[in-house]
Image (spheres, helix red, strand yellow):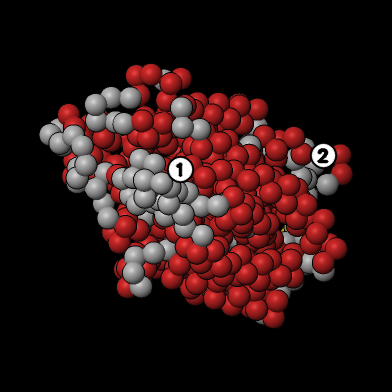
Amino acid sequence: MENGTKGKLTVSSSLQVEQPLAPSKLWKIIVVASIAAGVQFGWALQLSLLTPYVQLLGIPHRFSSFIWLCGPISGMIVQPVVGYYSDNCSSRFGRRRPFIAAGAALVTIAVFLIGFAADLGHASGDPLGKGSKPRAIAVFVVGFWILDVANNMLQGPCRALLADLSGGKSGRMRTANAFFSFFMAVGNILGYAAGSYSHLFKVFPFSKTKACDMYCANLKSCFFIAIFLLLSLTTIALTLVRENELPDKEEQEIDEKLAGAGKSKVPFFGEIFGALKDLPRPMWILLLVTCLNWIAWFPFFLYDTDWMAKEVFGGQVGDARLYDLGVRAGALGLLLQSVVLGFMSLGVEFLGKKIGGAKRLWGILNFVLAICLAMTILVTKMAEKSRQHDATGTLMGPTTGVKIGALLLFAALGIPLAVTFSIPFALASIFSSNAGSGQGLSLGVLNLAIVVPQMLVSLVGGPWDDLFGGGNLPGFVVGAVAAAASGVLALTLLPSPPADAKPAVAMGGFH
């Protein structure tokens, strides 16, 4: 591409396809990746505080996992749809930026509904005190659905934009996804820090009402901060980073015609089924490894703070003492996990080179994940064995050794989490780029391997745990087995990504 001109690859006498443009400056990639901090701040609040919150609204443990079906169902539909249309968007504001802006606006609406669910429910007739609050639950579920739709609208186009800005370079794609993972860690740190501080509601005194107690008011206050952070980062990124480096609409139409190989344009779902039908073998293996990886992670994501509150601290839902202390300790554990995640994210590229490649690093750390999930059994047994009561017969919290062991387990999980948040997405971008595929739709297809296991765990997780007495350990054991299987497949079947190379011209199939 001499003298700044765009290179062309001749395909026929009447058809030309644009080669990828040069990678953008690193600061642009960092600015776009920083949006992940705002998105993950809200996710951290969901993962640490919302499962206890929905139980306080009156939903029992065995049904609380069904609430989390919102995420995978919306992700299964929304992210591929958004990816497909962002690949083909002709807005003057760019292909990805309109979807990112719309997602940020929807997050604001959703967070308001979730935070004020108890107030809106009481205003509609819900009783005060303990017991089921059906109207508040309805408002919460609507807000939760919107939040998951919005998060999928944000994350898919953000990762696709990072791939666009990487100019088809494998190394730059891995670096971009590593920065995305790093900023996810930053968002986690901020979110878990906010969630573990029990007096944050005093900054927003109006948040505490008759229907919204201290715990609820603290959650509401956290969401106010989440809105401000996300809107600020999104505004900065969309203002500073333009998409004028990407192909214009006429060149996109040529690419689409070539990829379609003379076929008429099919509807979106036909595009998805066509992509799955002709999926290259490396992508199929990547989907399988990713699927098992998320079967391992999701039980812990869903019940990590609940495990700390119940199994480690010995509390019960509604217990304003041990259970709340356990939830806050769990949030502290997730904070430590995020610190490890942040440092590990910056070292993924280096470690991958030292160990022998990204796929080998992913496989090894899946075994680390399996060991950590299995260790929850040991920590739980230690906590049960060391239970103590004070002079009045009141159950006391766990010993210092048990708390340190549980917190170290949370922190250690940040190591494999950094790989989960970066390597699968980098591999999908690399495989699709080398096949000449659209980044948005390719990442949407990868998202199917994430949301399907989430749906499975959400459907059977609660009843499965209830079958063994209502605790969280049965799901963690299944996760350990899935993590080990994922590690085996990553090491034995997953192909190593190619070095930076010119992507092949797509002649149909996965696009």
Residue, disc 1: 325
SS of the residue at dot 1?
A: helix
Point out residue 64 in the picture as x, y percentages from the top left corner: 32, 55
Q: Residue at x 38, y 19 (%)?
A: 205
Point out residue 99 in the picture as x, y percentages from the top left corner: 48, 40
Residue, disc 2: 4
260 above or below 337?
Answer: below
Q: In the image, 202: left or right of 261? A: left
The three-letter code of the residue at mark 2 reads Gly
Give the mark nearer the N terminus: 2 vs 1.
2
Furthest-front residue in view? Answer: 391
Q: Residue at x 41, y 31 (%)?
A: 218
Given this view, does label 2 or label 1 mark the residue nearer the observer? 1
Q: Is residue 144 visible?
A: no
374 above or below 201?
Answer: below
415 above or below 43?
Answer: below
Q: CA distance from mark 2 to mark 1?
A: 60 Å
Point out residue 214 in the picture as x, y percentages from the top left corner: 36, 30
